[in-house]
Image (cartoon, rainbow, N blue to C red):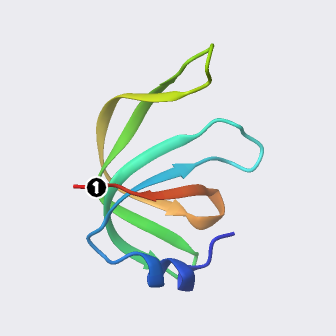
Amino acid sequence: MISVDKLTSCYEVGTILRVYESSERSEQYTIYEGRLKAFLDSPPAIILSKAYKVIYDISPITGSEKIIGKVPVGTVFIQLKHVRKIEEVEE
């Protein structure tokens, strides 16, 4: 699992992040993109404010992913144990 200490040294509050979330048994991802609001120690979690759920399409031929839309969802609370990947998004 990603540690809160490591994340706080990498990302500042206000940074726009894309967070890939999935359950332990799933290969499917839910992608959220939003402005970092806070990191919580207990339970270890990330809060994104004004977040969007990113809708993407995977090419059956190449396997490449293409973002095809974003659905506004407001504030999102994501437990670190469900985070698979984090990317910083350029404004």
* Rendered image quadrant of residue 58: top right
**Residue at horizontal 34%, vertical 55%?**
89
For residue 34, side relative to residue 39 (left or right): left
Disc 1 crowd rating (10 Å Cα; few below 14, some 14-19, many 20+) is few
Residue at x-position 69% and y-position 69%? 1
The percent position of residue 83, horizontal first and vertical second, equals: 59, 58
Residue drawn at x 38%, y 40% as measured from the top left? 53
Out of 39 and 87, give the one closest to the viewer: 87
| Residue at the limit of the structure toward the top, as seen here | 61
Residue 54 in percent (x, y) is at: 39, 37
Q: Is residue 87 left or right of residue 74?
A: right
Q: Position of residue 91 (x, y in %)?
A: 22, 55
Q: Is residue 7 left or right of residue 29?
A: left
**Residue 48 position (above or below residue 39):** above
The image position of residue 63, as x and y in percent, is 62, 24
Total number of numbered labels? 1
Q: Secondary structure at mark 1?
A: loop
Residue found farthest to the left: 91
Establish if 59 lies above or below 33: above
Q: To which residue does mark 1 refer?
A: 90
| Residue at point 47%, 43% (across, down) | 31
Tell me where residue 4 sits by quadrant.
bottom right
Q: Nearer the viewer, residue 83 or 86?
A: 86
Which three-letter amino acid code belongs to the residue tagged 1?
A: Glu
